[in-house]
């Protein structure tokens, strides 16, 4: 890169910072993408003239609204809800809904921005969006969650639709919450359409949607390893999180012959040197869904395991591969250095932006296999896209058909990353650059076709 191009990138990031004060997650996500895109668009006049990157980094619209609900003690509670519709150049807005006290406009803007590239990578016609509320479903009764979801949808319904914007689940939003929101949408509009994905199988959901993100992250890992003549079988894995993505990533690692050593939640992590096998994974799934318990309870059930509390993360445990599957910025530069020092050969992100910018630099400098979330965790939204197709066609596809499609989609995303991520340095592939450019190109070319809109 020449020095004047470098100044352009810096000026661009400064502009993003100036226009989005107090939104560090959003600025971080744009920063990570912009460096690769700037390099790619050098000499491609139309992308500059039409200000494509500047436009992708400015959401089409952000809807923010009050959500009032009544708790079981008849107290009136007030939360804030959002839907960020980032870009619909290649299909209806699509992206999850997150219910967590840490949700802010910045977090949802970063997620909607990333989602735009991720959805493009799947090859399916889906734009990028994300939504949520600063509501904490933990510790709430089913009826409280129902009242909140109904109130949330009472505003959201005006802004979504099967051909407009199709939300799904994310942190704090699983099958229960999707059911309550779909029920309310149906009641208000008197329409049964595919307005949400991640639905129950009885009312338009797709087989393998629940498993797809975690399985997909392991398929991506398998593709990276295979490209180097290696395999998941026989590898040890550290995994963070214990929710939907983490437990299904663990399950697929075990199915492919690997050994899972850790899982975690926001209170700390468990280390089980004997390996977390299918029976233990099933126990964790029940603990975290139906029993709504804490990972610290694992050590009472399975002897030989230890729990480290105080919000500790598992990155100090020595393993061959790592899958961060909890939340954003859960793996920093020091954690990345520890993993590399301990001989990690591959990292596949099940969560969105779990590695901070310093951590990404450590992985890149160490030339290990590193798959960013927008590529590695795209399996979930891909199967959501297949759920939309099934809803439009008013039919349900068979499990083996869907499993085959998920495998193909993950292999295609891997191939797209290879196409744009090859570095000329032996076998080293920059998967971050590959994912950024491949995801950007399709959206950018559609935007060029539309002119200035
Ligand atoms: P879940 O709500 O099922 O699980 C989240 C897990 O992460 C829990 O173990 C939770 O612990 C932990 N966690 C949440 N917030 C924090 C925090 N601030 N610090 C430490 N741990 C935390 O969510 P999912 O598994 O669905 O999502 C996990 C990640 O994967 C998110 O980044 C999400 O955006 C991403 N993702 C999810 C997809 C999906 O299909 N579900 C699709 C693509 C990406 P605790 O129980 O203590 O809260």
Image (tube, grey):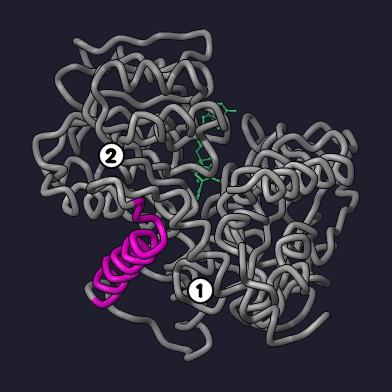
Q: Is residue 281 visible?
A: yes
Near-viewer residue (323 or 357): 357
Give the mark nearer the N terminus: 2 vs 1: 1
Q: Residue 235 vs residue 108: left or right? A: left
The residue under the point 40% across, 60% down is 379
Which circle, 2 or 1, is nearer the viewer? 2
Q: Residue 349 vs residue 355: left or right? A: left
Query: At numbered mark 1, what does the secondary structure look like: helix, strand or loop?
Result: helix
Near-viewer residue (6 or 279): 6
- Residue extent of the magenta highlight: 401-423
Residue 288 appears in which quarter of the rendering? top left
Q: Residue 66 vs residue 124: left or right? A: right
Query: At numbered mark 2, what does the secondary structure look like: helix, strand or loop?
Result: helix
Q: Quadrant of the C terminus?
A: bottom right
Residue 121, image x and y in percent?
47, 66
Assess disc 1: are there few (<14), some (14-19) or many (≥20) residues with their C-alpha within 10 Å of its C-alpha.
few
Assess disc 2: are there few (<14), some (14-19) or many (≥20) residues with their C-alpha within 10 Å of its C-alpha.
many
Q: Which mark is residue 4?
A: none
Q: Is residue 290 visible?
A: no
| Residue that badge 1 annotates | 203
Q: Residue 300 vs residue 21: left or right? A: left
| Residue that badge 2 annotates | 250
């Amino acid at each position: 890169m020449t020095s004047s191009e470098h100044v352009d990138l810096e000026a661009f990031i400064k502009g993003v910072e100036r226009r989005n004060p107090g939104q560090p997650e959003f600025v971080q996500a744009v920063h990570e993408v912009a460096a690769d895109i700037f390099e790619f668009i050098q000499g491609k006049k139309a992308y500059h003239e039409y200000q494509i990157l500047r436009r992708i980094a400015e959401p089409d619209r952000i809807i923010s609204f009050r959500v009032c609900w009544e708790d079981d003690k008849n107290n009136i509670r007030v939360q804030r809800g959002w839907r960020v519709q980032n870009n619909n150049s290649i299909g209806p807005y699509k992206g999850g809904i997150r219910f967590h006290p840490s949700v802010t406009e910045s977090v949802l803007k970063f997620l909607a921005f990333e989602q735009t590239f991720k959805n493009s990578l799947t090859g399916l016609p889906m734009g990028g969006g994300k939504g949520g509320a600063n509501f904490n479903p933990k510790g709430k009764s089913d009826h409280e969650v129902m009242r909140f979801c109904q109130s949330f949808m009472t505003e959201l319904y005006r802004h979504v639709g099967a051909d407009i914007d199709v939300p799904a689940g994310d942190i704090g939003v699983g099958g229960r919450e999707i059911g309550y929101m779909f029920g309310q949408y149906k009641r208000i509009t008197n329409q049964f359409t595919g307005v949400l994905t991640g639905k129950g199988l009885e009312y338009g959901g797709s087989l393998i949607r629940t498993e797809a993100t975690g399985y997909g992250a392991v398929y991506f890992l398998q593709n990276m390893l295979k490209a180097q003549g290696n395999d998941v079988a026989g590898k040890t894995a550290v995994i963070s999180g214990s929710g939907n993505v983490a437990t299904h990533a663990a399950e697929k690692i075990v199915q492919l012959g690997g050994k899972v050593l850790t899982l975690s939640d926001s209170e700390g992590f468990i280390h089980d040197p004997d390996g977390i096998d299918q029976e233990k994974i099933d126990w964790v799934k029940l603990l975290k869904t139906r029993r709504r318990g804490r990972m610290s309870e694992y050590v009472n059930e399975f002897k030989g395991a230890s729990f480290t509390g105080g919000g500790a993360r598992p990155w100090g445990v020595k393993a061959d591969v790592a899958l961060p599957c909890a939340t954003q910025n859960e793996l920093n530069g020091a954690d990345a250095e520890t993993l590399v020092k301990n001989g990690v050969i591959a990292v596949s992100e099940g969560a969105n932006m779990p590695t901070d910018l310093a951590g990404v630099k450590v992985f890149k400098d160490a030339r290990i296999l590193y798959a960013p979330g927008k590529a590695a965790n795209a399996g979930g939204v891909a199967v959501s896209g297949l759920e939309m197709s099934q809803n439009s066609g008013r039919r349900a596809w068979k499990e083996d058909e869907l499993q085959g499609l998920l495998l193909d989609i993950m292999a295609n995303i891997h191939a797209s990353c290879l196409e744009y991520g090859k570095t000329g340095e032996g076998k080293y592939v920059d998967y971050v650059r590959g994912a950024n450019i491949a995801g950007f190109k399709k959206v950018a070319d559609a935007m060029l076709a539309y002119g200035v809109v």
